[in-house]
């Protein structure tokens, strides 16, 4: 597996696997909190490293896998994001966030059918999920299917999502 960073990025040495306390949920949670802080600072290499460490400490926690997938995407490696996202979904098939991120990943790869399927699963879990509706509408717009995009945004607008109302207004014929 190639290193989880791009050429020229600074990266502290990864946490040695032997130093990770296996099965310690609190330690895994702390690693995830650290990873989020690195992500907030736009240091996705370090975020990835912490998410990966969290999956080794507590392989039963889907958050670490979801974070790894998201970090892969932020590092410009969407193809590699799929496996950890699917692992996370396997651990928590009712996670709207993981399904939506999988949809985002497939959309970035222009695998439209799989993106639609993932967004639809996210919307089964959270029927008026703003983020999934917005992403699905944006994907249809990118696919040059404006009628479908507007229909999705209209659903969100009808449910009171102001952002989708604004998106719909901005994309009227």
Image (cartoon, helix red, strand yellow):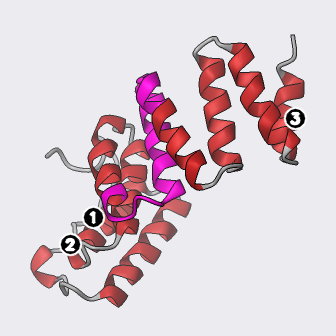
Which residue is denoted by mark 3 in the rendering?
Answer: 166
Residue drawn at (27%, 64%), measured in percent from left and top?
Answer: 52
Left or right for 128, reference 66: right
Please tell me in which quadrant of the rendered image residue 17 appears: bottom left
- Which residue is located at x 22 percent, y 67 percent? 14
**Residue 110 is drawn in which quadrant?**
top left
Label pair 1/2, CB-CB below 8 angstroms: yes
Q: Secondary structure at mark 1?
A: helix
Badge 1 vs badge 3, beta-carbon distance below 8 Å: no
Q: Residue at x 51, y 70 (%)?
A: 37
Q: Is residue 104 magenta?
A: yes
Marker disc for residue 140: none
Left or right side of 34 for 15? left
Bin the neighbour count of mark 1 within 10 Å (Cα to Cα): few under 14, some 14-19, many 20 and up.
many
Where's residue 122, x and y in %? 54, 48
Disc 1: which residue: 52
**How far apart are the two marked residues, 1 and 2, measured between alpha carbons?**
7 Å
Residue 137 vs 131, above or below: the answer is above
Which quadrant is home to the C terminus?
top right
Label for residue 56? 2
Element type at marker 3?
helix
Region of the chain picked out in magenta, as a range: 89-115
Q: In the drawing, does residue 23 fall left or right of residue 75?
A: left
């Amino acid at each position: 597996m190639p290193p989880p960073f791009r050429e020229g990025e600074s990266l502290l040495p990864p946490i040695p696997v032997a130093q990770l306390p296996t099965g310690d949920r609190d330690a895994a949670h702390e690693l995830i909190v650290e990873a989020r802080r690195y992500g907030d600072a736009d240091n996705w290499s370090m975020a990835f490293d912490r998410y990966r460490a969290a999956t080794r400490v507590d392989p039963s926690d889907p958050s670490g896998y979801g974070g790894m997938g998201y970090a892969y995407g932020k590092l410009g490696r969407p193809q590699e994001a799929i496996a950890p996202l699917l692992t996370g979904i396997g651990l928590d098939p009712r996670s709207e966030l993981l399904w939506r991120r999988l949809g985002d990943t497939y959309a970035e790869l222009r695998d439209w059918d799989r993106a639609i399927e993932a967004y639809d699963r996210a919307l089964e879990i959270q029927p008026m999920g703003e983020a999934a509706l917005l992403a699905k509408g944006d994907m249809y717009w990118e696919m040059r299917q404006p009628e479908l995009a507007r229909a999705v945004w209209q659903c969100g607008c009808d449910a009171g999502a102001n952002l989708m109302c604004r998106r719909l207004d901005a994309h009227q014929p």
